[in-house]
Image: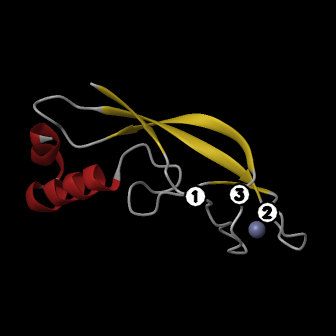
Amino acid sequence: MVVELRSRQCAPRCPSCGTISPRVHSRYPRQLRDVPCIGHAPRLMLTVRRLRCETPTCPRRFFTERFESFARPYARITERLRTLVTRVAHALGGRPGARLA
Ligand SMILES: [Zn+2]
């Protein structure tokens, strides 16, 4: 199961200076794993925007839009799946948790 997603954020904020930046530099695909759905492990194909910070004093010229409640930066799994795996690991431990997951 493959789900293609695209952000609906109007203009993301620069993580360094907090300025809203509507200037899109490029886009790239990001692949995430999510919690199982009807017995399948879905792959989320997310199109992420790379933006340009227009503040002259900002040390970061380019940044990638963030999805704070959905997935952490550089993560390959969603926050929902991370929470699920963490709970299984805490409840069952290493090998039993890995067998169940
Ligand atoms: Zn900035």
> Disc 3 residue type?
Pro
Q: Is residue 2 left or right of residue 30?
A: left
| Figure check: 93 above or below 1 | below
Q: Percent from the top left, x then y, of residue 9?
A: 53, 56
Q: Is residue 39 left or right of residue 5?
A: left
Report crowding for label 1: few under 14, some 14 to 19, many 20 or more residues within 10 A (C-alpha): few
> Disc 1 residue type?
Cys
> How many angstroms separate mark 1 from mark 2 (CA)?
20 Å
| Helix, strand or loop at mark 1 | loop
Q: Give the mark, 2 or 3, whose residue is nearer the N terminus.
A: 3
Report crowding for label 2: few under 14, some 14 to 19, many 20 or more residues within 10 A (C-alpha): some
Residue bearing mark 3 = 22
| Helix, strand or loop at mark 3 | loop
Q: Give the mark, 1 or 2, whose residue is nearer the N terminus.
A: 1
Residue bearing mark 1 = 10
| Beta carbon of the mark 2 residue lies under 8 A of ligand 1 | yes
Q: Percent from the top left, x then y, of residue 37?
A: 16, 36
Cβ–Cβ below 8 Å for labels 3 and 1?
A: yes
Q: Percent from the top left, x then y, of residue 25?
A: 76, 44
Residue bearing mark 2 = 60
Q: Give the mark, 3 or 1, whose residue is nearer the N terminus.
A: 1
